[in-house]
Amino acid sequence: MRATPSELRNDMLIRYRGEWQRILEFHHVSQGQMQALIRAKLKQLSTGEEHEVRLRAGEVVELLPAEHRHCDFLYRDEDHFIFLNPATYDEVPFPAEHFGGASRFLKSGVVAEGILAGDQLVNVELPHSLDVTVKDTSDTISGEYSAKGWKTAIVETGARIEVPLFVQPEDVVKVNTRTGEYMERVHPS
């Protein structure tokens, strides 16, 4: 399926310079008497790299028909994260190398936003924050913590994060999956 830049929208998948890209954002730019341009921020699906491009108004791009779907994380094998497609109950692999740093907070049952092209998972976005249980803070007991009142904690997924001194093992904390930063301690309801 083909489209002109004026038909593009956020989250569409296009082939640009031979690679499948996801449109993160775009802007129509009119330059007086010159031909209008589309400035777009794209994310290359195979590498996760983000970059900006300019598309001419008459240029034609190929669209990849895709659907957004919630996918449940099941487990990780050697090279892939395995998600469940809730519509078909199929296990769908996603290459670990394309996931990025947020993967260190993945645990069974996390629901991610997936983009499916046919039966292939081409992109996965974790929620902006996840609740994880602190398993250990013992490596900071000897006084090895920062002067600002933070210490290192190991959470249930094995990731290391910086937490305030009052956080103890078995506490549940909210973590920003984009930055890996502590957000708050979650109180049980």
Image (cartoon, grey):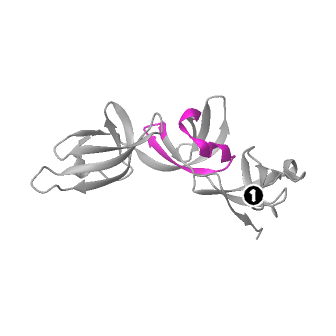
Q: Where is residue 129 in the image (x, y as percent from the top left)?
A: 62, 57
Q: For this view, does 73 lie left or right of residue 170?
A: left
Residue drawn where x is 84% and y is 59% of the image: 168
Q: For this view, does 102 lie left or right of residue 12?
A: right
Q: Nearer the viewer, residue 39 or 13?
A: 39
Residue drawn where x is 77% and y is 56% of the image: 146
Whether 109 is among the magenta residues is yes
| Residue for badge 1 | 163
Q: Quadrant of residue 52?
A: top left
Q: Quadrant of the N terminus?
A: top left
Question: Residue placed farthest to the right in the image?
Answer: 142
Residue range highlighted in magenta = 96-122
Residue drawn where x is 16% and y is 44% of the image: 58
52 versus 119 height, above or below: below
Q: Element type at marker 1?
A: strand
32 versus 54 height, above or below: below
Whether 183 is among the magenta residues is no
Q: Which of 73 and 166 is in front in this view?
A: 166
79 versus 58 height, above or below: above
Q: Which of 89 and 173 is in front in this view?
A: 173
Question: Residue placed farthest to the left in the image?
Answer: 33
- Three-letter residue code for mark 1: Val
Could one spot residue 1 in this view of the protein?
no
Q: Quadrant of the C terminus?
A: bottom right
Q: Position of residue 143 (x, y in %)?
A: 87, 54
